Image (cartoon, rainbow, N blue to C red):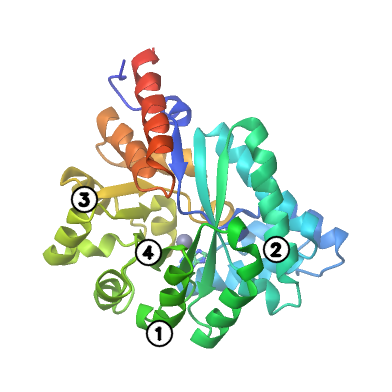
Amino acid sequence: MLPRKVSKEFIEGLPKSELHVHLEGTLEPELKLKLAKKNNIDIGQSTIEDVEATYHYTSLASFLAVYYPGMNVLQTESDFYELAMAYLKKAHEQGVVHTEMFFDPQAHIIRGVPLNYVINGFYQACVDARAFGIDAQLIMCFLRDMSARSAMDLLNAAQPYHNKILGICLDSYEHHNPPLKFMQPFSLAVEQGYHITMHADVDQIDSIEHIKQALEIINVERLDHGTNIVENKDLVDWVNQLHLGLTSCPLSNELITDNDLKGDEILDLLDIGVKVSINSDDPAYFGGYIADNYWALASEYKVTPEQIVQLAKNSIETSWISKEQKQLYLEQIDKYVEEYDG
Ligand code: HPA
Ligand code: ZN
């Protein structure tokens, strides 16, 4: 039975899917230090406290300035494997049954790390995680502050790994890097059979124009973040009518804006039927995994158990799995609620 009030424990046990998590953003300070030592990389910090002291952001740009240098510790295929495995275990503990995880190959290739280390390491973790009941898939990102040519090169280089990659995304620094810059690589990605999504980070300069391009010209299947659509009724109607997913990340929103989880926007959109979901984005950097994000929303806003369940159902419905698989997960959610005794 549904509980009268939302609790962290109810959230943690609720079967859910995570659709917006950057594997490089799951690099916890402990693992960062361990890999730095193993690979002889000077990251400028030697204790967890030192590492955490660098985690101060007031904008997307200031977050990315911490996020990219942290990746230097990832050098071997087993480093990528260990990183993904650590995330998948955590996600499993927090009720994740299916996840579609972003990764940023260009950020590794420019450091001289071969693409096969990245993809094979991450993919092997996806395979091994099946043993503990998570279905994990990979979404390859183009960095929008690099060129469209570089994105095309990556798409071509990834061709031999096509069967290990479910979709393509656009992330990184948004200002002056509109979706249209990547028209060509996204068209080709669709031709090649990939699913496509794009970041529309919260409160960016030109947010609405970028969202219009992503929805109306590139024809993305989901929008990552994207809650700025509330500023434009036509965009809300568009997203609602096409049942497009919006992958929102409350703790990320809080840290890169002026303390705003965007809970009002998330709940308003949920209320009118938009398929918004809750996700962790970069959990090692933003202070919490998926259940912590649901809980942040539930504890700071008026959120009912029904709304929490709807958010979890949205995460399944807007995932890129088969209709049959979706049905199975939705039934798991109903069964969990039915049998819940708390
Ligand atoms: N936005 C853009 N780029 C990113 C993000 C994000 O939330 N996380 C990691 N790279
Ligand atoms: Zn993101």
User: Is tag 4's residue or tag 2's residue first in the polypeptide sequence?
Assistant: 2
**What residue sits right under mark 2 in the picture?**
118
Q: Report the mark closest to the observer, 2 or 3.
A: 2
x, y percent for residue 24? 62, 60
Q: Residue at x 41, y 30 (%)?
A: 328
**What residue sits right under mark 4 in the picture?**
257
- Asked whether the viewer can see residue 314, the reply is yes
Q: Report the mark closest to the observer, 1 or 4.
A: 1
Residue type, numbered disc 2 = Val
Looking at the rendered structure, the secondary structure element under dot 2 is: helix
Q: Is residue 78 above or below residue 300?
A: below
Rate crowding at label 1 as few (under 14), some (14 to 19) or many (20 or more) other CA atoms within 10 Å: few
Residue 269 numbered mark, or none: 3
Looking at the rendered structure, the secondary structure element under dot 3 is: helix
Side of 59 relative to 39 (left or right): left
Residue type, numbered disc 4 = Thr
User: Is tag 1's residue or tag 4's residue first in the polypeptide sequence?
Assistant: 1
User: Is tag 2's residue or tag 3's residue first in the polypeptide sequence?
Assistant: 2
Of residue 324 and residue 265, the one placed in the foreground of this image is 324
Cα separation, mark 4 vs mark 2, equals 31 Å
Cα separation, mark 4 vs mark 3, equals 19 Å
Cα separation, mark 3 vs mark 1, equals 28 Å
Cα separation, mark 2 vs mark 3, equals 36 Å
User: Is tag 3's residue or tag 1's residue first in the polypeptide sequence?
Assistant: 1
Looking at the rendered structure, the secondary structure element under dot 4 is: loop
User: Is tag 2's residue or tag 1's residue first in the polypeptide sequence?
Assistant: 2
